[in-house]
């Protein structure tokens, strides 16, 4: 082979090695690992298995629930999937398998604590009491506790429930609040507990109870599922204001830092607001009803200044 041709081939070899799509030589360095791995057992496991366990609700409309095709949808679900994509990019994984785990108000904390669920984004209030057992992301929503009644019912305030029946979802802050209020006001309300929000509303719709106490946004979601949504109205001076957050295990600072970073990015970029508008200001499954609920100033402030502070 002529010397000139040999020289040209030698010069071309480094360029060929740099071409996209060519295999790396054996022993070449791998892509840099995320610095957050040292602070997070959860991230190390996700990186090793390529799987994340996501907790979701079954009937928390419009936050996290099954649509008519049994697909998990909702405002909180959309935010959680965006966070998962951020986790995938941080860990430089080609894909992450999402293992969806249904949770209830009663078991959601224990499933996070025992490792069955890595991240739960639904309608879970961040409270000081719960912070003793789990960690919370920056807040994703703010709500007030009210009640849903028939439009023609002679009920305006919680005091009007004396001598009547009310239903709450077991394991919720609404249950705790109404039981405490009832005890301090003579215990005249007959309280029933339901397994989930759907079951609670069914008790109201079938006439077994006179009122359903729950967070206002969830009450709007239940009304949207009703056979005749116009038959129902929200009433009652709010007993409390609460913030929802995504729930994760305590003592995992790297995982929390990444979840908080991704949620904050969504809020600051305006993407979270677009997701809000999709679920609260446009027709949603299962009946294509529009909740017609513009974002409150309190929610917009959460978007401007993300925080994981509990309100109670």
Image (cartoon, rainbow, N blue to C red):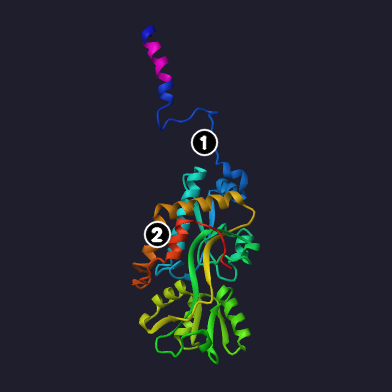
What residue does disc 1 label?
31
Q: Nearer the viewer, residue 258 or 288?
A: 258
**Eyeballing the image, is 245 above or below 224?**
above
Residue 286 image offset from top left, x and y in percent: 38, 71
Q: Please identify the dominant SS of the magenta region.
A: helix
- Check the image and name the residue furthest to the top: 3
Left of 25 or right of it: where is 223? Answer: left
Q: Nearer the viewer, residue 296 or 164?
A: 296
Q: Nearer the viewer, residue 115 or 191?
A: 191
Residue 161 image offset from top left, x and y in percent: 52, 88
**Eyeballing the image, is 219 above or below 306?**
below
The part of the chain drawn in magenta is 5-13
What residue does disc 2 label?
273
- Cβ–Cβ below 8 Å for labels 1 and 2? no
- Determine whether the residue tagged by mark 1 lies in a helix, strand or loop: loop
**Eyeballing the image, is 15 above or below 76?**
above
Residue at x-position 50% and y-position 50%: 261
């Amino acid at each position: 082979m002529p010397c000139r041709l040999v020289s040209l081939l030698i010069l071309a070899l480094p360029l060929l090695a740099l071409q996209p799509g060519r295999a790396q030589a054996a022993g070449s360095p791998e892509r840099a690992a995320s610095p957050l791995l040292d602070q997070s057992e959860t991230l190390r496991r996700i990186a090793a298995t390529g799987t994340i366990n996501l907790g979701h609700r079954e009937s928390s409309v419009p936050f996290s629930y099954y649509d008519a095709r049994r697909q998990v949808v909702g405002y909180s679900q959309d935010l959680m999937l965006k966070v998962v994509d951020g986790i995938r990019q941080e860990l430089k994984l080609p894909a992450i398998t999402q293992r969806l785990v249904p949770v209830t108000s009663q078991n959601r904390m224990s499933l996070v604590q025992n490792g069955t669920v890595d991240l739960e984004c639904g309608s879970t209030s961040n409270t000081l009491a719960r912070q003793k057992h789990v960690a919370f992301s920056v807040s994703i929503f703010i709500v007030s506790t009210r009640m849903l009644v028939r439009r023609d019912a002679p009920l305006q305030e919680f005091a009007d429930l004396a001598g009547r029946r009310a239903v709450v979802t077991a394991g919720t802050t609404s249950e705790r609040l109404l039981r405490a209020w009832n005890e301090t006001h003579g215990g005249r309300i007959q309280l029933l507990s339901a397994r989930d929000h759907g079951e609670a509303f069914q008790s109201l719709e079938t006439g077994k109870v006179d009122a359903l106490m729950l967070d206002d946004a969830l009450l709007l979601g239940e009304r949207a599922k009703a056979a005749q949504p116009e038959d129902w109205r929200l009433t009652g001076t709010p007993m409390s204001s609460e913030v929802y957050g995504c729930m994760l295990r305590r003592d995992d600072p790297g995982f929390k830092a990444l979840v908080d970073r991704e949620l904050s990015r969504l809020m600051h970029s305006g993407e979270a607001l677009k997701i809000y508008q999709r679920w609260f200001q446009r027709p949603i499954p299962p009946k294509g009803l529009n909740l017609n609920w513009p974002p409150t100033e309190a929610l917009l402030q959460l978007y401007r200044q993300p925080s994981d502070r509990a309100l109670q």
